[in-house]
Image (cartoon, rainbow, N blue to C red):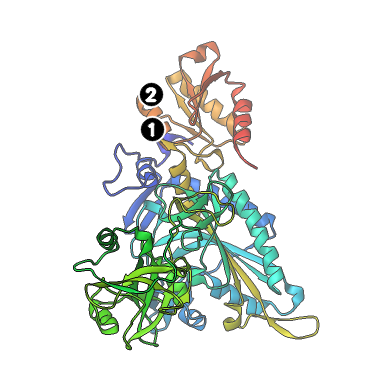
Amino acid sequence: MRATRFLMPTLRDAPADAQAISHQLLVRAGFIRQIGAGLYSYLPLGWKVHRRVEQVIREEMDAIGGQELMMPVLHPAELWKRTGRYGIQELFKLQDRVGRDLVLAMTHEEIIALHASEAIRSYRDLPQIWYHIQTKERDEPRPQGGVLRTREFTMKDSYTLDRDAAGLDAQYALHEIAYDRIFRRCGLRFYKVDSDVGMMGGFGAHEYMAPSPAGEDRVVLCDGCDYASNVEMAVSIPRPVEPPHGAEVEEVHTPDVATIAALSEFLGIDEGLTAKSVIVVPEDEQGGVVLAIVRGDHRLHELKLGRALGAAHRPAHPDEIRSAFGADPGSIGPARVPNGALREIVLDPTVAEGGYVVGANRTDYHLRNVEHGRDFTARLADIRHVEEGDTCVHCGGTLRIEPMIEVGNIFKLGTRYSEPMGALYLDEDGREHPVWMGSYGIGPARILASAVEQFSDERGIVWPQAIAPFDVWVVPIGDEARDAAGELEVELAKAGLTVMVDDRDLSPGIRFADADLVGVPLRITIGKKLAEGVIELKHRGSGEQETVSPAGAPARLRELVDAAVWR
């Protein structure tokens, strides 16, 4: 490929709104261009990387028995209504010319279950692995980070179909092997972490996370063992405190004290000896408010609370709080609650033993020494946010929290979709059972962006060899060098290497800068030393240089590419 015939609009400066390194560099290096909020075109360089990532995915999916198919993006809404997912806010909804409801798919569980209901008849038809790499649409409320969070994207989603839980476990394990190989081949640093099933449903899930300051997810890691979990599922042992046991409840006047910090200072005690009360309103039909309590030095985790409630929720308004507790916000607690609108109390286990300072449900008053089981009763649930420096429950090591990008996820769906879609099979005795399903997603664009986040420097991108847009970048300097570059391009192609020859009529310095910005791993410079039978080879990542002969270059470059690609 010749640069003079290639669409490669590099820029000196990144867009003003680009915060993530990957967003800045992919735009500057001419890989992507934005056409609207969360909508991007992949220019030739970007699409080459995307396709190389896809190829790695295909090879590893095929290796575990996956069968590639292609399913449409446009779905009849009735299918999503049957599974109860039509109400998802991020789902694009539309109508055709005669008023039929349609959706633009963000995932394809319903369609897989539909095809299974038509194609699977007997236990002999199982197991199956079906996958496709297809466009997805998501009405993302806050697209950001370039291609990290968009409204239209490409995803590999695969689905397993099995007889039972044991079969699902086996297929799940196969995908774990495939995913490990995919991310290693793409050159990423990554973790497999425990995660919540979210809107997918089912009963088990893991996420694959790539460390990056641009990541929106927070992952808890242990310095002493391999424990890794998304914060929404993480557990830990907090720093110890010593609350009193058995002491009498004492009411204390606390004028104008409405925060934990102010309460701790007013009483001269550790914040960990107080209890934080958060009042929420579940968005269901039962009515009433819920009082959620965590230790004063901890934070409530909203997703954990949502799981405990089994429903979405919102913060209670001040008038709702006063109506339920008879006091202003800041003076609320679990003891001496007036009869009214309180549905239940959900208590984090870290405040289940001993006496804590809580609101008295009387404006400007608090209670000391309030104990669960004696002064109030509550349902225990893990609803606290794990904190940096907490202790690992598995090994006693110290926990840290890192930002990461979610690049893949795997879910055990069970019969969540097969039952409403009628995906059934007959066993050996002619009895009917629902098919057990698993769902497994990977975002090629997120792999691409994560690689840029993890492998870049002040000069630009440093692509992992396996997914670079080209294997080799050639810069000829002078007319004789241009002829030699053409000959070398032919020989490198014979060696199975992809090549960009930068034949633009620009200074060597500009072309070197563009080569560094674009980030092809190996650069050949053909210059004055050609007369001596020597050309220069530079490694983009390390900056190391060596000289080779034109005749020996194909073999040497092939050796370097093979050594750099994890297989």
Callout 2, which amino acid?
Pro
242 over 94 or under it: above or below: above
Contact check, label 2 and label 1, Cβ < 8 Å: no
Mark 2 and mark 1 lie on one chain; the one further toward the N terminus is: 1
Can you identify the residue that label 2 sits on? 508
Q: Quadrant of the C terminus?
A: top right
129 over 550 or under it: above or below: below
* Secondary structure under the numbered disc 2 in the rendered image: helix
Image coordinates of residue 368 in percent, x first then y, are: 33, 70
Judged from this view, the residue extending furthest toward the top is 532
Can you identify the residue that label 1 sits on? 459
Image coordinates of residue 491 in percent, x first then y, are: 60, 29
Name the mark nearer the viewer: 2 or 1.
1
Specify whether 235 is left or right of 331: right
Specify whether 87 is left or right of 560: left
**Residue 340 can be seen in this image:** yes
339 over 362 or under it: above or below: below
523 over 280 or under it: above or below: above
Specify whether 566 is left or right of 104: right
Residue at 46% from the left image edge and 34% from the top image edge: 2
